[in-house]
Structures are given as C-alpha cells and as structure tokens.
Amino acid sequence: MNILKWLIKIILTGLSFPLLIFPFSPRPACLFLRNLFRFGTYIRPRDYAFARASVRIERDLPYRERNVRCSRLDIISPAAVSAPPLPVLFWLHGGAYVGGDKSDVEGYAVQIAACGYIVANINYPLAPESPYPSGVRAVADAYRFICSRLIELNADLSSVYFAGDSAGAQMAAQFVTAQLDESYARAAGIGQVVPPDTIRGAALFCGLYDAEAYAARFDRRTPLSYLVRRVFWGVTADPNWRNGPALEEASVVRHIPRCGFPPVFLTDGNIGTFTEQGIAYAQALRECGTSVETVFYSRSSVFLPHEYQFLMHRSEAIKTFSRFIEFLERTKK
C-alpha cells in the first residue's frame, strides 16, 4: 500500500510540474504545440507512385556544423540525368516555429521534383531551443551547402526559388526580403548570401505575414490567448516580446524592399487560417510593382483548411499544384 501511495505521488508530481512552471517558462507551451505537429497533413494524389519512381532522394544531409536533425536537409531531384542544369527550390516546412519536420512535406517535394526541379527540403532550428531568427538564418547555410554540391547536383543556381508553408512561408518571405534589402538584413541579423538577380520567385503557402497584427488578437484572458502568448515568448526568447523588435521584423508586409520583389506565388485556404493576411500581403506586393499570382477559393463554394494544398485528394489542391508548377515554368530562367 505504501508503494502504491508513493507511485501516485510521483505521477501527480509529474503531471503537476508542467502546470507549476507554465507561468514562468514558455517551454511547456512550445512543447505542447510541437506535439500537435507530430504528424503531417499530406495526402498523396492518385499518381504519386509515378512521381516517386521518377525522383531520387538523399536524406538527412548535414548542412551546418552541428550534425543534429534540425541541421539536416533532403535533396529531392529527378532521377533521369538532365542535360541543362535544373532550377533549385528551397522549401521550409511549417510548424508554428516550434514544431514540424521536413518529412511532413516530402510528398509534395517529390511532386515538385518530378516536374523537373531540385528541391532542398530543409529542417531548421526550432524554438524555444533556438529562438528567432535562428531558423531564417539557417537558410543561408542550406544555400551555401547546395552551392558546395553545384556540379554534382547539376543545379542551376542562377535560377532559385524560396518556398514554404505556414511558418515556413513567412520565413521564406523574410529570407528573400533580407537578400534584397541590406539595411533590413543587417537589422534582423540575416546574412545576405544569394545574389538577388538569381532569385526567380517565392512560393508562399498559408503563411503569416503580419505577426504584430496577429499577436494583437490574443490580448484576451482565454486559455488559447494564454497559450499563444507563451509561444510568442518562446519563439522570441523575450518575455517582453510585445515591445521587442522580433514581431515587427517578422511582419514582412511592412518591409517590402524598395528595389522590388521577385515574382510571388501565394495561396491559402479559407477557414482557420491566414487568408486575410495573404490577401493583404499580395496587395501590398502588387502596389510595389511585384508580379503576384494568387490562388484563393470562395468560402461560399468550398471550405478549405490551413495547409489545404497538401490534401492532394481534393480537386482544389490539385488545381493549386498545377497553377504552382505553371508559375515555376513561367518564371524560371
């Protein structure tokens, strides 16, 4: 009986410890949210087997000095030898900056590679262990790694794209912004490594482009607002994150380079996602002279959730993928 009481005390202590430290640390909230991203949403299309058979995958290549999972990438490329070098697309997965994995989007990357592209599918450092802007900075390392294998891959680095979904879409947009705007790159601490004239475009799926406006929605005293505020703390490593520079820097809609932006493909669902932010960012880019192709669907005809593009059994996702490949074909060198 004493042993049973002892075990019950241990279990209750283990369960209560996260609740006790929750107000004093962002880590429990971040790990809770990370756990929700353990499984991806990708559903294969009917012809996936054909696409998979036409590509080769090199997995878990360390692209940074630290050989850990968040410092590895996969290279997915056409299996057939191509005479002309192929364009390279760098993809950043979603996961609210605290979770997700490159494996979540491998199927989608396979589909892209099957259309004649080299896809660098990147794992990047996650918060709270590696706070903002560690993930965005890692893209520069991934780019350098691909440069080091240029001839071996038969890659055309005069024709590169940066793409991502959800948090990865924001990061891709921010990285491209930094490559084009020296003062912004310096302020955000993001390296300029990609020649601007080689960036053929950005592909943004279901992204958050105004972090300040989004954060303002969670001032209420609700469990969800409390959780989100803790996650922002973890992502920025700043308990006073509302008054820090991170959210303003990450709000790419407020930092469109004066020199212009490469062509953009932008899409989002229409329920439980960032539709309004996508529309606003597309409009702001157009007002600055950027060529933007958008794919949105009316809620009056269909309901599409966050990351709908990965539901490749649905006609809307199939249509979006076709539009995306047409965008790549039209903009590549």
Image: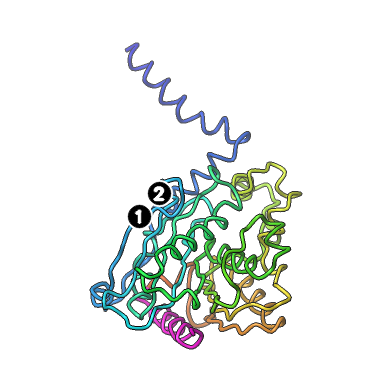
Q: What percent of the width, then of the height, locates residue 237?
A: 63, 43
Please give left or right for residue 51 compared with residue 93 in the image: left
Whether residues under marks 2 and 1 lie with C-beta atoms below 8 angstroms apart, the answer is: yes
Label 1: which secondary element: strand
In this figure, which colouring scheme has been used for the structure?
A: rainbow
Who's the residue at 54% across and 33% down the image?
A: 19
Verify whether residue 320 appears in magenta. yes
Instruction: Name the quarter where the N terminus is drawn.
Output: top left
Q: Residue at x 33, y 71 (%)?
A: 77
- The disc placed on residue 69 is 2
**Residue sitting at x 47%, y 74%:** 157
Q: Looking at this view, is 203 or 146 the one in front?
A: 146
Residue 69 is left or right of residue 185, and the answer is left
* C-alpha span from label 2 to label 1: 7 Å
Residue at far right of view: 243
The magenta segment: 312-333
Residue 60 numbered mark, or none: 1
Report the front residue among 242 and 68.
Answer: 68
Dot 1 alpha-carbon crowd within 10 angstroms: few under 14, some 14 to 19, many 20 or more: some
Coordinates of residue 311 in the picture (x, y in percent): 39, 71
Q: Earlier in the sequence, mark 2 or mark 1?
A: 1
Residue 129 location in percent, x, y? 53, 42
- Dividing the picture into quarters, in which one does residue 89 lie? bottom left
Q: Amino acid at mark 1?
A: Asp
**Going by the image, does 149 lie left or right of 192?**
left
Compared with 121, 219 (above or below) is above
Residue that extends furthest to the top in the rendered view of this protein = 2
| Amino acid identity at mark 2 | Arg
Asked whether residue 178 is drawn in magenta, I would say no
Vertical placement of residue 39 versus 238, above or below: below
